[in-house]
Image (tube, rainbow, N blue to C red):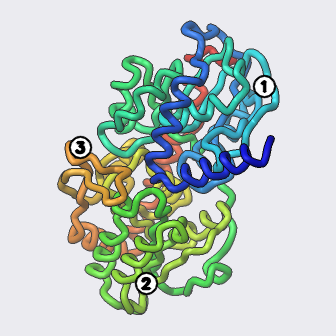
Amino acid sequence: MKPGQQHLIRAAHGAWRLLPRELRRRAMTGIATRLARKPDTHPPALSNGVIIAGDNATTNGLAESARLMHQVIAEHGLARGFVPFGLPGSVPEHRAPAPAGAALLAVVNAPILPVGLLRLPRNFIANRRVIGLMAWELPVVPKSWVDGARFVHEIWAPSQFTAQALEPLAPGRVRVVLHPLAASDLPVSGTRASLGLPENTLIVLTIFNLASSMVRKNPLGTIKAFQAAFGTRADVLFVLKLSGTHSYPQDLALIRAAIGDAPNIRLITHTLPEPELRGLIAASDIILSLHRSEGFGLIPATAMLLGRAVVATGWSGNLDFMTPETSALISYRLIPAQDPRGTYQFPDSHWADPNVEDAAMRLRALEDPSQRNTLAAAGQAHARRVLGGAPVLAALAANGVI
């Protein structure tokens, strides 16, 4: 390549990086939709196992979903490999050949799907069944998802709530497949002592990634609920475990301002390996999620399986594994979905505004060890029943995967 060409490429790349991230992503999806190969109109009736494709390195919900699916499918002898799949700069390119005859389970949302396929060898999906596992947190999906849905034969949704939102994209081709969290061991590492947490203290815990939208996760509401329940009591500690803080300093500043000088609220922002994150859950007494909406709710589900009492908004995807008898479901009112960051800016749609007073009342009630233990035991038993591997295996069988 001549020096002049190299200069033009560097200049074009620099100009591209100056565009807003969402605009770059929409443009990338539009180009990929036109260029990527679409799956065969009629997929094979039978497939020899399944290749899982997704982001195996990050800590977001879809990446964890991809890891879970691969683990469960591998344990039943049906996995035929894991393919890095996603956006350039986030996921490495994959050019290795794939086993012939295996279905492809792409754990990625619709706008990224054609981009991921374009980065694979052109014939990768020839004569192959393609399934997309997608997550969304509102009753309607963005218009930008329509084109991506054309690249799959079937869509898997992690909850009834998400399935209803996805159904218009692929009428009759959306299947509910709950995340199989209970199908495999959940390694736990750490104790209160090793995690720097006090003994003989009631610990309330909230965990979320700022990349998942601060407004949707509603940490300011959780802080208000905790303070309404316990004030500044020294025998109760509220722990907020956040990730993605380096990318969203303004959100972090708002959270710090809401905490103020409260002596019984602790912020944890450093990265924890998954076993240690589960250790933090196991070391806590109550897991609090006053979300405005969830496509599924991996943290509350994990907490229930680990035998922790869960207090959560009684709306959206978490209701597929939470009931009034197995968790403390908080009342709410529906309000227009408005997100300053733009990800969930859908004023014509809605999400929940959880009742802070109700949450405070339920937190105070669970201060009683007897009530807390009874709820935790019921939640654990229920989660073990509904979050096993059977739905995944049934969905694979329905798609001819053997």
Cβ–Cβ under 8 Å for marks 2 and 3: no
Estimate the x, y position of residue 334 in percent, counting from the top left.
Answer: 19, 51
- The dot on residue 265 is 2
**Quadrant location of residue 255?**
bottom left
Residue 230 at least partly seen: yes
Q: How far apart are marks 1 and 2 (CA)?
A: 50 Å
Q: Residues within 10 Å of mark 1 (few under 14, many from 20)?
A: some
Residue identifier under label 3: 349
* SS category of the residue bearing label 3: strand
Left or right position of 352 against 266: left
* SS category of the residue bearing label 2: strand
Left or right position of 160 against 183: left
Q: Quadrant of the N terminus?
A: top right
Q: Which residue is drawn at 41% across and 81% down?
A: 256
The tag earlier along the polypeptide, 1 or 2, is 1
Estimate the x, y position of residue 131 in percent, counting from the top left.
Answer: 56, 25
Residue identifier under label 1: 98
Front-lying residue, 335 or 78: 335
* Residue 393 higher or lower than 200, as above or below: above
Query: Which residue type carries mark 1?
Result: Ala
Front-lying residue, 396 or 4: 4
The tag earlier along the polypeptide, 3 or 1, is 1
Residue lying at the far front of the rendered structure: 4
Q: Quadrant of the C terminus?
A: top right
Q: How far apart are marks 3 and 1 (CA)?
A: 41 Å
